[in-house]
């Protein structure tokens, strides 16, 4: 075991392996600051605790299925590696390590447009089904080039990020340490709208997933525009500070979509019990981001493999303890809201 | 008086008498960690405080009955010693001390399958009515042997633990101190289901109680399968982290059962006022666990006797102060939820 | 000015003037402890903050009436000195100082059965309308003697304490400092019930008030038994720990009583804004206890006079700022509950 | 950049530039104290966090309009400089710097009756549309003089403060540092009522805005009396401690007014996301107070200009991130309440 016993200690342990700059970059959230204000990044984590697990018992749990399929892609667990930029800040093997680790355990890797390694090289690192995260470019030609590349390289789905028409101001670290607000990426397209979603969908045979949906009305529009799935996400709290935590945004979206397309969720998922909560609330799968970067920083490919392995083991354990045998059909009523609001609100 | 004035200081005081290993073992909860995250073990305690006591006054309370019967077993108080494994970690007299102490004060002792002392020796320690906690074994023959033993030794009821088809990962202490995740016990039976409950019920004339019910649907199934009672329990937070605190799980189960069988509760009960809350919410009795282990560690048999004695005295006091004269018929409306709670309203 | 600028600093300042024993006695609450558990005494204070004040404006507030009558006794402010035992622990002048101070500012003094000074001496200290707090004695003869005395001395009302059929265990301080659980007073009558209330009412022409009502059903019984008023009180958290804070118990009682008798409240009232909240929620007046003991400890009679004077001035100010001109008819809708329940919950 | 990266650090940074007296004066709130009690000033800030932002996506946000008109006055942003007294405590250029800075960025400056500089001089500092905050005087003649002045100087609207019929006791600092309760200003008029509002309205052709409305009933009266707008305000927590935070008072007032007049809000607005929340809840604009005083203390005119510039930039960013293109028509349903109320409750 290369990671700490408690996965909640991952972030602290990772700090020993990260430069201040990398720490700042990965932990950063929109408008985050030294004073430790209430940010969406921290609320994402806390909000899952709003949902209590209420197990069923006396179910034969000797056979547990964590295997499922996502958009038709079979996977050994409903946990995906979220698209994270610049993995090289965490470890020199960067996305190559993540690719090998996820391939090894059978988890889907969603490769970022802003990866530290070229997609072709990532794809060659290990044979596996992968998805490609796409930033639409102001120049539609570039967007199409990326789509062509995704198809050529053999990605199985395209995940279009829709919550970044512009960057958000982020203040990681202090000027005396050489950091400042991150410049808004040039590539972002403030004109991205449903018409472009339709155009992109026509440009490719790959299933199209929209990442960054928080409002049920947008989920309904996604269904109407024929996309294959949506990721309920607030970009890990890195875009709009004050955005609703995904644990609260998820249920109304699941209700609005009503099974017509798949719904995934990311943001603050830090344990297999959080995965259970998300699935019980109607998600088909979850994406985890920062935790695998921390594992990558601590122990490279082996760390990432251990992380996904342990999450899958703990998910199996949590399924046994809640009387759920098939990850694709978790009972809805094994989660109940905390009375009032006394969940562990993040400290100021 | 051997115990601290305030019973809330028991745990701190007990630390002086316990090895780090024993502390770790007893205080441990699923996935617990050094960072002090909000776990079910701690939420169990806090959740009772959700319920305010709203006393009745001007009732003649010169005669108070804390005596009641539980499954027909008369007891001097509605407070049982919960089944706890390995009492020898707390004190060399282990379950023998607990047996004598509970016999002395007239509380029912529920003896664990994993006791440090053999059941026969515990039974010989002092004449009293006791119950036996049963882990169903993968090997049904072994389960039946335990049942025979329970009958032969003269236990008055069998308490089948149903929330442990598998162990949960626990991380008590740190590797450098020689601890690691506890291996899942071999004896646990992941195939335990209602059929086995029926089989066990047929194997014995002792009343059968199911321990580890949190979902009202399972309580209804328990009634349908003819069990005599259920213990609303999340295993002291030692199994599924994130499980609903029992103070919140209890009311809907009482409602679902509707008086057809007896309902007990454990988890975070730390004072006679918590006992009052549980009884007012519909429990027939409560089980306490860690507090008697702490008392055992501090002062052996005498400590356990003092603990139960004081809880009973304080229960009598709390009954006088709430105008309740008979512990078997506490008014429901002397507890009210803390404002803001959506819990007052029917189940979501 | 002898008291600190901020009245919230009274308790801290008073500590410099009180022996540890007196501090323990006055600050004490049922089951209170060093660990700072969630107690009713602290919740009483916090609960008033649940209610936001929502002022009316553009009302002519150049004439403000804080004067009112309570059970027909005219008073300069709707703030009474609650019956507190053993004022000599705070200051050698004890109840004589309180009597003079309250007489000086025109506030009603409710004298405790357990005063440090004889009632006759208190009455002689200054001419004023006073009430007498009565503990019913197991020996009805003694109860009647106290009633006779109350009439002879000229008290204007009798306040029968009904929430103390027995004492509660209190643990103030530690054995090494020479303190232990306070013995239950012998005088308390566990047989006190409505029949005795009726008997007492017949024994005297003084109006009878019941102190210690928390349940609306008891308030309705109080009306039926012809008492003149009730004090919504949990004995300052000194009796049943876990009892509902009076700021939450008050509104349903006001609703149940529906104007048929007067309703007062005590418990955690620490400022003129708390007084406003209580009045808006339907109380005719409030009683304050510990604050005047602190003021007494700090500056004797002068401190108590300053305290009531400042509370009355600040009440006048708060009335002006909420557009309320007559203390006897404060609008109900100038208080609104805090969304959900995030009022200042006491820290563990 | 002269201000700290995180605007939440403004107050801390400003302390280095302010005398203790000025710090006390600006940060002060009614009844505030060293012990850090729950005050309305702090609750104002926290209450905005009760409202989560729930963005819309896939809207073309390449053209964003932060420009709007307020009472017909065109403005580059829906953020006004609130009327704050004695700006000279922050910087020798005082209101002249604020006037130039707001003129430079196109924000409306509401000049206080109690400004450190004469209104005429402020008006001459830079050409811009400004409003005048009016305290009604006991002497109606003086009130009228101020109105004449406001017209002569060319102010575009009159903002009558209605929540100060009297001052509130404030305790900033300690006597040993030479501070004491602030004397109630002589100028305040406790007799101010709706009749005087009507009289003032007749005395001037300038639109009349009432500042200090918290109760929907008063907002309805404001409509009936023909005023042009209301500012939902609790005077920054400097008047009635315990008053409802404006983030909670705003929605019912918007509902009551139902579009008949404009509604503005101030109190605890500390970021562009707070501005978004206010606009989504129905405010036409917000006023900020302490933040510009802090910016003024740190860097004079340049600081204030930077502050408004950054707030406007961040508002534009937040609009892009929530799919809102026109500041005058923000969707209502992009804000949702936090489940229960566990918003960042100020620590005791």
Image (cartoon, coloured by chain):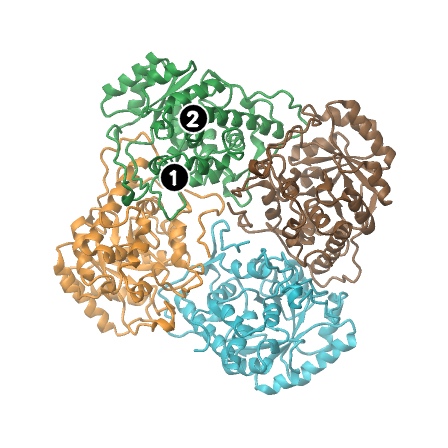
Chain colours: A orange, B green, C brown, D cyan
Q: Measured along the vertical axis of the image, is residue A44 above or below residue C174? A: below
Instruction: Tell me how far mark 2 sits from mark 1, CA to CA.
Output: 32 Å
What number is the disc on residue C236? none
- Evaluate whether residue B257 shows in this view: no
Q: Is residue A121 left or right of residue C6?
A: left
User: Contact, CB < 8 Å: mark 2 with mark 1?
Assistant: no
Output the chain of dot 1: B
- Evaluate whether residue D233 shows in this view: yes
Place of residue D326 in the rendered image (x, y in percent of width and height, measured from the top left): 46, 71
Place of residue A136 in the rendered image (x, y in percent of width and height, measured from the top left): 27, 68
Element type at marker 2?
Answer: helix
Q: Measured along the vertical axis of the image, is residue D94 above or below residue A19? A: below
Closer to us: D296 or D153 = D296
Q: Residue at the spot x=38%, y=68% of the render? A: A171
Count of marks, rendered view: 2
Q: Measured along the vertical axis of the image, is residue C56 above or below residue C301? A: below
Output the chain of dot 2: B
Q: Is residue D186 left or right of residue C7?
A: right
Place of residue C344 in the rendered image (x, y in percent of width and height, measured from the top left): 55, 50
Q: Measured along the vertical axis of the image, is residue B172 above or below residue D340? A: above
Closer to us: A146 or A126 = A126
Residue that numbered label 1 is attached to: B243
Q: Earlier in the sequence, mark 2 or mark 1?
A: 1
Place of residue B33 in the rendered image (x, y in percent of width and height, measured from the top left): 35, 45
Element type at marker 1?
Answer: loop
Closer to us: D6 or C33 = C33
Q: Nearer the viewer, mark 2 or mark 1?
A: 2
What number is the disc on residue B300? 2
């Amino acid at each position: 075991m290369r990671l700490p016993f408690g996965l909640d200690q991952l972030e602290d342990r990772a700090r020993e392996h990260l430069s201040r700059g990398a720490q700042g970059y990965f932990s950063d959230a929109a408008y985050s600051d030294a004073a430790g204000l209430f940010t969406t990044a921290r609320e994402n984590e806390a909000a899952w605790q709003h949902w209590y697990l209420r197990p069923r018992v006396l179910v034969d749990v000797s056979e547990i299925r964590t295997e499922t399929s996502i958009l038709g892609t079979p996977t050994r667990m409903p946990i995906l590696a979220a698209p994270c930029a610049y993995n090289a800040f965490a470890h020199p093997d960067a996305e190559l390590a993540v690719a090998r680790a996820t391939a090894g355990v059978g988890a889907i890797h969603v490769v970022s447009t802003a990866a530290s390694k070229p997609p072709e090289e990532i794809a060659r690192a290990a044979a596996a089904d992968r998805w490609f995260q796409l930033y639409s470019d102001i120049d539609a030609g570039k967007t199409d080039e990326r789509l062509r590349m995704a198809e050529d390289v053999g990605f199985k789905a395209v995940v279009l990020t829709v919550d970044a028409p512009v960057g958000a101001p982020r203040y990681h670290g202090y000027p005396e340490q050489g950091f400042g607000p991150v410049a808004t990426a040039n590539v972002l397209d403030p004109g991205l709208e449903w018409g472009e979603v339709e155009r992109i969908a026509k440009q490719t045979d790959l299933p199209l997933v929209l990442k960054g949906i928080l409002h049920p009305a947008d989920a309904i529009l996604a269904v109407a525009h024929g996309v294959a799935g949506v990721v309920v996400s607030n970009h890990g709290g890195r875009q709009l500070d004050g955005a609703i935590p995904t644990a609260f945004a998820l249920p109304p979206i699941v209700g609005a979509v009503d099974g017509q397309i798949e719904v995934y969720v990311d943001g603050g998922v830090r344990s297999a019990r959080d995965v259970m909560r998300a699935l019980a609330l109607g998600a088909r799968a979850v994406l985890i981001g920062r935790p695998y970067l921390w594992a990558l920083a601590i122990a490279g490919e082996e760390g990432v493999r251990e992380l996904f392995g342990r999450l899958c083991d703990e998910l199996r354990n949590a399924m046994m303890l809640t009387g759920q045998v098939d990850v694709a059909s978790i009972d809805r009523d094994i989660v109940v809201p905390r009375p009032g609001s006394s969940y562990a609100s993040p400290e100021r």
